Amino acid sequence: MTDLQDKVVVVTGGSAGVGRATAEAFAREGANVAVLARGQKRLSETVQELQRLGAQAMSVSVDVADPQQVENAAQQVEEQLGPIAIWVNDAMTTIFAPFKLMTPEDFRRVTEVTYLGFVYGTMAALKRMLPRDRGVIVQVGSALSDRSIPLQSAYCGAKHAIRGFTDSIRSELIHDNSNVHITMVQLPGMNTPQFDWCKSLMPRKARPMPPIYEPEIAAGAIVHAATHHQREYYVGWPTVEAMWGNKFIAGWLDRFLARTNYQAQQTDEPENPSRPDNLREPVPGDYGAHGRFDDRAKNESVQVWATEHIGWYRGVAAVAVITVAAAVGGALTLLCQGRDRGRRG
Protein backbone atom coordinates (compact mmCIF):
# COMPACT_ATOMS: atom_id res chain seq x y z
CA MET A 1 0.00 0.00 0.00
CA THR A 2 1.18 3.54 -0.71
CA ASP A 3 2.44 5.27 2.44
CA LEU A 4 -0.40 7.20 4.10
CA GLN A 5 1.59 8.35 7.12
CA ASP A 6 0.56 11.92 8.01
CA LYS A 7 -1.40 12.37 4.75
CA VAL A 8 -4.52 14.50 5.25
CA VAL A 9 -7.77 12.73 4.39
CA VAL A 10 -11.27 14.21 4.37
CA VAL A 11 -14.28 11.90 4.67
CA THR A 12 -17.76 13.36 4.19
CA GLY A 13 -20.51 11.48 5.99
CA GLY A 14 -17.69 10.16 8.15
CA SER A 15 -19.45 9.92 11.52
CA ALA A 16 -21.38 6.69 10.82
CA GLY A 17 -21.73 3.77 8.43
CA VAL A 18 -19.25 3.30 5.60
CA GLY A 19 -17.86 6.79 6.20
CA ARG A 20 -17.08 6.00 9.84
CA ALA A 21 -15.41 2.69 8.91
CA THR A 22 -13.43 4.51 6.21
CA ALA A 23 -12.22 7.22 8.56
CA GLU A 24 -11.07 4.54 11.02
CA ALA A 25 -9.34 2.58 8.24
CA PHE A 26 -7.34 5.63 7.16
CA ALA A 27 -6.46 6.38 10.79
CA ARG A 28 -5.08 2.85 11.21
CA GLU A 29 -2.82 3.49 8.20
CA GLY A 30 -1.32 6.57 9.84
CA ALA A 31 -3.30 9.27 8.03
CA ASN A 32 -4.60 12.44 9.66
CA VAL A 33 -8.36 12.45 9.22
CA ALA A 34 -11.00 15.18 9.02
CA VAL A 35 -14.59 14.04 9.31
CA LEU A 36 -17.44 16.11 7.84
CA ALA A 37 -21.04 15.46 8.89
CA ARG A 38 -23.94 17.23 10.60
CA GLY A 39 -24.38 15.82 14.12
CA GLN A 40 -21.87 17.45 16.47
CA LYS A 41 -22.09 14.83 19.22
CA ARG A 42 -21.47 11.95 16.83
CA LEU A 43 -18.63 13.90 15.22
CA SER A 44 -16.97 14.37 18.61
CA GLU A 45 -17.27 10.67 19.39
CA THR A 46 -15.78 9.81 15.99
CA VAL A 47 -12.80 12.12 16.55
CA GLN A 48 -12.16 10.51 19.93
CA GLU A 49 -12.09 7.08 18.29
CA LEU A 50 -9.74 8.27 15.53
CA GLN A 51 -7.40 9.76 18.10
CA ARG A 52 -7.47 6.50 20.05
CA LEU A 53 -6.26 4.84 16.84
CA GLY A 54 -3.31 7.22 16.80
CA ALA A 55 -4.44 9.76 14.20
CA GLN A 56 -4.52 13.50 14.33
CA ALA A 57 -8.22 14.10 13.78
CA MET A 58 -10.72 16.89 13.53
CA SER A 59 -14.36 17.33 12.63
CA VAL A 60 -16.46 20.01 11.00
CA SER A 61 -20.23 20.12 11.33
CA VAL A 62 -21.44 20.70 7.78
CA ASP A 63 -24.45 20.06 5.58
CA VAL A 64 -22.89 18.94 2.29
CA ALA A 65 -25.95 20.28 0.42
CA ASP A 66 -24.62 23.79 1.15
CA PRO A 67 -21.60 24.55 -1.09
CA GLN A 68 -20.35 27.38 1.11
CA GLN A 69 -20.32 25.15 4.17
CA VAL A 70 -18.29 22.56 2.25
CA GLU A 71 -15.83 25.19 1.03
CA ASN A 72 -15.45 26.62 4.53
CA ALA A 73 -14.88 23.13 5.93
CA ALA A 74 -12.12 22.43 3.40
CA GLN A 75 -10.43 25.68 4.38
CA GLN A 76 -10.62 24.78 8.07
CA VAL A 77 -9.08 21.37 7.41
CA GLU A 78 -6.11 22.82 5.55
CA GLU A 79 -5.54 25.45 8.23
CA GLN A 80 -5.59 22.87 11.02
CA LEU A 81 -4.18 19.66 9.48
CA GLY A 82 -2.42 20.76 6.29
CA PRO A 83 -2.86 20.18 2.54
CA ILE A 84 -5.64 17.73 1.69
CA ALA A 85 -4.22 14.67 -0.08
CA ILE A 86 -7.36 12.53 -0.31
CA TRP A 87 -11.01 13.56 -0.35
CA VAL A 88 -13.66 10.85 0.06
CA ASN A 89 -17.23 11.79 -0.87
CA ASP A 90 -19.58 9.50 1.04
CA ALA A 91 -22.37 11.57 2.60
CA MET A 92 -25.83 10.36 1.61
CA THR A 93 -29.47 10.13 2.49
CA THR A 94 -32.39 8.38 0.85
CA ILE A 95 -36.12 7.68 1.06
CA PHE A 96 -37.61 4.21 0.86
CA ALA A 97 -40.88 4.79 -0.97
CA PRO A 98 -42.61 4.36 -4.32
CA PHE A 99 -42.02 7.45 -6.43
CA LYS A 100 -45.78 8.14 -6.58
CA LEU A 101 -45.79 8.80 -2.81
CA MET A 102 -42.83 11.18 -2.74
CA THR A 103 -43.01 14.96 -2.54
CA PRO A 104 -40.91 17.26 -4.73
CA GLU A 105 -39.29 18.69 -1.61
CA ASP A 106 -38.16 15.30 -0.34
CA PHE A 107 -36.87 14.21 -3.75
CA ARG A 108 -34.91 17.45 -4.09
CA ARG A 109 -33.38 17.03 -0.62
CA VAL A 110 -32.09 13.52 -1.41
CA THR A 111 -30.62 14.84 -4.66
CA GLU A 112 -28.99 17.82 -2.97
CA VAL A 113 -27.26 15.67 -0.34
CA THR A 114 -26.49 12.48 -2.25
CA TYR A 115 -25.56 14.01 -5.61
CA LEU A 116 -24.81 17.73 -5.20
CA GLY A 117 -22.93 16.99 -1.97
CA PHE A 118 -20.45 15.04 -4.11
CA VAL A 119 -20.27 17.88 -6.63
CA TYR A 120 -19.53 20.46 -3.94
CA GLY A 121 -16.99 18.18 -2.25
CA THR A 122 -15.24 17.60 -5.56
CA MET A 123 -15.18 21.35 -6.23
CA ALA A 124 -13.61 22.09 -2.85
CA ALA A 125 -11.04 19.33 -3.29
CA LEU A 126 -10.06 20.30 -6.84
CA LYS A 127 -9.72 23.96 -5.87
CA ARG A 128 -6.84 22.89 -3.64
CA MET A 129 -5.44 19.87 -5.48
CA LEU A 130 -5.17 21.30 -9.00
CA PRO A 131 -2.68 24.09 -8.17
CA ARG A 132 -0.51 21.52 -6.36
CA ASP A 133 -1.00 19.00 -9.21
CA ARG A 134 -1.56 16.11 -6.82
CA GLY A 135 -4.37 14.49 -4.85
CA VAL A 136 -7.04 11.83 -5.05
CA ILE A 137 -10.83 12.08 -4.95
CA VAL A 138 -12.79 8.94 -4.15
CA GLN A 139 -16.50 8.87 -4.99
CA VAL A 140 -18.35 6.24 -2.96
CA GLY A 141 -20.82 4.86 -5.45
CA SER A 142 -23.17 1.91 -5.64
CA ALA A 143 -24.23 -0.95 -7.85
CA LEU A 144 -27.37 1.19 -8.16
CA SER A 145 -25.40 3.69 -10.25
CA ASP A 146 -25.93 1.28 -13.15
CA ARG A 147 -28.85 -0.94 -12.14
CA SER A 148 -31.70 0.94 -10.45
CA ILE A 149 -34.20 -0.78 -8.19
CA PRO A 150 -37.73 0.12 -7.12
CA LEU A 151 -38.45 2.11 -3.93
CA GLN A 152 -35.21 4.14 -4.20
CA SER A 153 -35.74 6.36 -7.24
CA ALA A 154 -34.15 9.46 -5.69
CA TYR A 155 -31.08 7.59 -4.45
CA CYS A 156 -30.63 5.65 -7.69
CA GLY A 157 -30.97 8.85 -9.69
CA ALA A 158 -28.31 10.53 -7.54
CA LYS A 159 -25.89 7.61 -7.91
CA HIS A 160 -26.38 7.58 -11.69
CA ALA A 161 -25.67 11.32 -11.70
CA ILE A 162 -22.48 10.86 -9.67
CA ARG A 163 -21.18 8.35 -12.21
CA GLY A 164 -21.88 10.68 -15.15
CA PHE A 165 -20.39 13.66 -13.35
CA THR A 166 -17.27 11.72 -12.34
CA ASP A 167 -16.66 10.38 -15.84
CA SER A 168 -16.82 13.93 -17.19
CA ILE A 169 -14.37 15.30 -14.61
CA ARG A 170 -11.98 12.39 -15.21
CA SER A 171 -11.82 13.20 -18.92
CA GLU A 172 -11.12 16.84 -18.13
CA LEU A 173 -8.28 15.88 -15.81
CA ILE A 174 -6.80 13.64 -18.50
CA HIS A 175 -7.10 16.45 -21.06
CA ASP A 176 -5.20 18.79 -18.75
CA ASN A 177 -2.48 16.19 -18.06
CA SER A 178 -3.28 16.58 -14.39
CA ASN A 179 -1.78 14.33 -11.74
CA VAL A 180 -4.98 14.61 -9.71
CA HIS A 181 -6.82 11.29 -9.81
CA ILE A 182 -10.55 10.60 -9.43
CA THR A 183 -12.06 7.15 -8.93
CA MET A 184 -15.34 5.48 -7.95
CA VAL A 185 -15.90 2.59 -5.55
CA GLN A 186 -19.18 0.81 -6.33
CA LEU A 187 -20.75 -0.86 -3.30
CA PRO A 188 -23.30 -3.65 -2.74
CA GLY A 189 -25.80 -3.76 0.13
CA MET A 190 -23.99 -2.70 3.31
CA ASN A 191 -24.74 -3.26 6.99
CA THR A 192 -24.96 0.40 8.00
CA PRO A 193 -27.34 2.48 10.18
CA GLN A 194 -29.00 4.12 7.18
CA PHE A 195 -31.82 1.57 7.25
CA ASP A 196 -32.81 2.77 10.74
CA TRP A 197 -32.57 6.51 10.19
CA CYS A 198 -33.39 7.23 6.54
CA LYS A 199 -36.94 8.25 5.83
CA SER A 200 -39.31 5.45 4.86
CA LEU A 201 -42.91 5.36 3.72
CA MET A 202 -42.99 1.58 3.58
CA PRO A 203 -45.14 -0.53 5.93
CA ARG A 204 -42.19 -2.64 7.13
CA LYS A 205 -38.63 -1.81 8.15
CA ALA A 206 -36.11 -1.30 5.37
CA ARG A 207 -33.14 -3.57 4.82
CA PRO A 208 -30.24 -3.75 2.35
CA MET A 209 -30.46 -6.03 -0.64
CA PRO A 210 -28.80 -9.34 0.27
CA PRO A 211 -26.12 -10.53 0.32
CA ILE A 212 -25.06 -7.91 2.85
CA TYR A 213 -21.47 -6.84 3.56
CA GLU A 214 -19.89 -5.26 6.61
CA PRO A 215 -18.76 -1.62 6.20
CA GLU A 216 -15.12 -2.56 6.82
CA ILE A 217 -15.12 -4.35 3.45
CA ALA A 218 -16.06 -1.09 1.75
CA ALA A 219 -13.59 0.88 3.85
CA GLY A 220 -10.70 -1.36 2.81
CA ALA A 221 -11.63 -0.95 -0.85
CA ILE A 222 -11.85 2.84 -0.46
CA VAL A 223 -8.39 3.03 1.12
CA HIS A 224 -7.03 0.84 -1.68
CA ALA A 225 -8.74 3.02 -4.31
CA ALA A 226 -7.18 6.13 -2.77
CA THR A 227 -3.69 4.68 -3.08
CA HIS A 228 -3.89 2.86 -6.44
CA HIS A 229 -4.75 4.68 -9.64
CA GLN A 230 -7.53 2.54 -11.03
CA ARG A 231 -10.57 3.98 -12.77
CA GLU A 232 -13.24 2.15 -10.79
CA TYR A 233 -13.62 -0.54 -8.15
CA TYR A 234 -16.46 -3.01 -7.66
CA VAL A 235 -17.02 -4.36 -4.16
CA GLY A 236 -18.62 -7.80 -3.90
CA TRP A 237 -19.96 -10.18 -6.54
CA PRO A 238 -23.51 -8.71 -6.33
CA THR A 239 -22.10 -5.40 -7.61
CA VAL A 240 -20.34 -7.10 -10.51
CA GLU A 241 -23.46 -9.10 -11.36
CA ALA A 242 -25.80 -6.09 -11.18
CA MET A 243 -23.64 -3.69 -13.16
CA TRP A 244 -22.56 -6.09 -15.88
CA GLY A 245 -25.78 -8.06 -16.06
CA ASN A 246 -27.69 -4.83 -16.65
CA LYS A 247 -25.76 -4.28 -19.86
CA PHE A 248 -27.22 -7.45 -21.36
CA ILE A 249 -30.50 -8.36 -19.65
CA ALA A 250 -31.84 -5.00 -18.47
CA GLY A 251 -35.39 -5.65 -19.65
CA TRP A 252 -35.56 -8.96 -17.85
CA LEU A 253 -34.14 -7.34 -14.71
CA ASP A 254 -36.86 -4.66 -14.85
CA ARG A 255 -39.51 -7.34 -14.57
CA PHE A 256 -37.59 -9.47 -12.08
CA LEU A 257 -37.03 -6.54 -9.71
CA ALA A 258 -40.66 -5.48 -10.04
CA ARG A 259 -41.70 -8.94 -8.81
CA THR A 260 -39.15 -9.39 -6.04
CA ASN A 261 -37.71 -6.15 -4.72
CA TYR A 262 -40.59 -4.68 -2.77
CA GLN A 263 -40.34 -7.66 -0.43
CA ALA A 264 -36.55 -8.00 -0.66
CA GLN A 265 -36.02 -4.48 0.67
CA GLN A 266 -38.27 -4.93 3.71
CA THR A 267 -38.03 -7.11 6.81
CA ASP A 268 -41.04 -8.68 8.51
CA GLU A 269 -40.97 -6.04 11.26
CA PRO A 270 -43.48 -3.17 11.03
CA GLU A 271 -42.04 0.29 10.48
CA ASN A 272 -42.72 3.05 13.02
CA PRO A 273 -44.12 5.91 10.91
CA SER A 274 -43.38 8.47 13.64
CA ARG A 275 -39.70 7.64 14.17
CA PRO A 276 -37.19 10.43 13.47
CA ASP A 277 -35.30 10.40 10.16
CA ASN A 278 -32.16 12.16 8.94
CA LEU A 279 -33.52 13.72 5.76
CA ARG A 280 -33.20 17.27 7.07
CA GLU A 281 -31.75 16.91 10.58
CA PRO A 282 -29.25 14.44 12.04
CA VAL A 283 -30.71 11.66 14.16
CA PRO A 284 -29.32 11.63 17.73
CA GLY A 285 -27.14 8.78 18.94
CA ASP A 286 -23.75 7.22 18.24
CA TYR A 287 -24.69 4.75 15.54
CA GLY A 288 -21.11 3.82 14.67
CA ALA A 289 -20.24 1.99 11.47
CA HIS A 290 -22.55 -1.02 11.75
CA GLY A 291 -26.28 -1.41 11.36
CA ARG A 292 -28.49 -4.16 12.79
CA PHE A 293 -27.57 -6.87 10.29
CA ASP A 294 -24.33 -8.20 11.79
CA ASP A 295 -25.79 -11.70 12.01
CA ARG A 296 -26.33 -11.73 8.22
CA ALA A 297 -23.45 -9.63 6.94
CA LYS A 298 -20.29 -10.93 5.26
CA ASN A 299 -16.97 -9.74 6.66
CA GLU A 300 -14.88 -10.78 3.67
CA SER A 301 -15.09 -10.68 -0.11
CA VAL A 302 -13.06 -12.88 -2.44
CA GLN A 303 -13.90 -10.52 -5.30
CA VAL A 304 -12.43 -7.51 -3.45
CA TRP A 305 -9.27 -9.47 -2.69
CA ALA A 306 -8.98 -10.44 -6.35
CA THR A 307 -9.49 -6.85 -7.51
CA GLU A 308 -6.77 -5.60 -5.16
CA HIS A 309 -4.27 -8.38 -5.80
CA ILE A 310 -4.92 -9.68 -9.33
CA GLY A 311 -6.10 -6.73 -11.41
CA TRP A 312 -6.83 -8.66 -14.58
CA TYR A 313 -8.98 -11.17 -12.69
CA ARG A 314 -11.85 -8.71 -12.47
CA GLY A 315 -12.15 -8.57 -16.24
CA VAL A 316 -12.16 -12.34 -16.53
CA ALA A 317 -14.72 -12.63 -13.75
CA ALA A 318 -16.91 -9.99 -15.33
CA VAL A 319 -17.03 -11.89 -18.61
CA ALA A 320 -17.97 -15.06 -16.74
CA VAL A 321 -20.74 -13.28 -14.86
CA ILE A 322 -22.12 -11.74 -18.04
CA THR A 323 -22.21 -15.12 -19.74
CA VAL A 324 -23.96 -16.79 -16.83
CA ALA A 325 -26.41 -13.92 -16.33
CA ALA A 326 -27.34 -13.87 -20.02
CA ALA A 327 -27.83 -17.63 -20.04
CA VAL A 328 -29.98 -17.58 -16.89
CA GLY A 329 -32.01 -14.63 -18.14
CA GLY A 330 -32.63 -16.31 -21.46
CA ALA A 331 -33.60 -19.58 -19.81
CA LEU A 332 -36.04 -17.88 -17.46
CA THR A 333 -37.59 -15.92 -20.30
CA LEU A 334 -38.11 -19.09 -22.32
CA LEU A 335 -39.57 -20.78 -19.25
CA CYS A 336 -42.06 -17.95 -18.73
CA GLN A 337 -43.03 -17.98 -22.40
CA GLY A 338 -43.55 -21.72 -22.22
CA ARG A 339 -45.82 -21.36 -19.22
CA ASP A 340 -47.82 -18.65 -20.97
CA ARG A 341 -48.26 -20.87 -24.02
CA GLY A 342 -49.26 -23.75 -21.78
CA ARG A 343 -51.97 -21.65 -20.12
CA ARG A 344 -53.30 -20.47 -23.47
CA GLY A 345 -53.30 -24.05 -24.76
Image (spheres, grey):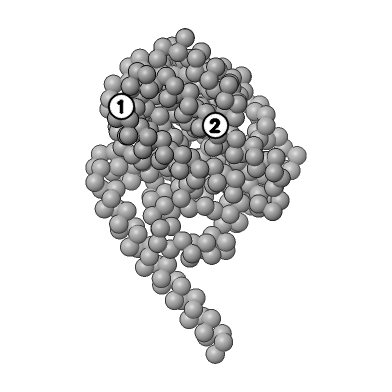
Residue holding disc 1: 179
From what the image shows, is residue 29 above or below residue 184?
above
Image coords of residue 285 (percent x, y): 63, 26
Label 2: few (<14), some (14–19) or many (≥20) C-alpha neighbours in 10 Å:
many
Amino acid at dot 2: Gly
From what the image shows, is residue 3 above or below residue 168?
above
Tag 2 secondary structure: helix
Label 1: few (<14), some (14–19) or many (≥20) C-alpha neighbours in 10 Å:
some
**Where does the N terminus fall, quadrant-wise?**
top left
Residue at x 48% of width, y 27% of height: 123
Decide which of 55, 341 is in the foreground and name it: 341
Furthest residue in direction bottom, as rendered: 345
Residue at x 52% of width, y 28% of height: 120
Q: Disc 2 versus disc 1: distance between alpha carbons?
A: 23 Å
- Mark number displayed over residue 117: 2
Amino acid at dot 1: Asn
The answer, for residue 50, to whether it is visible in the render is: no
Image coords of residue 55 (percent x, y): 41, 15
From what the image shows, is residue 83 above or below residue 24?
above
The answer, for residue 292, to whether it is visible in the render is: yes
Indicate left or right for 123 with 303 as reference.
right
Furthest residue in direction top, as rendered: 80
Indicate left or right for 52 with 29 as reference.
right
Image coords of residue 16 (percent x, y): 54, 29
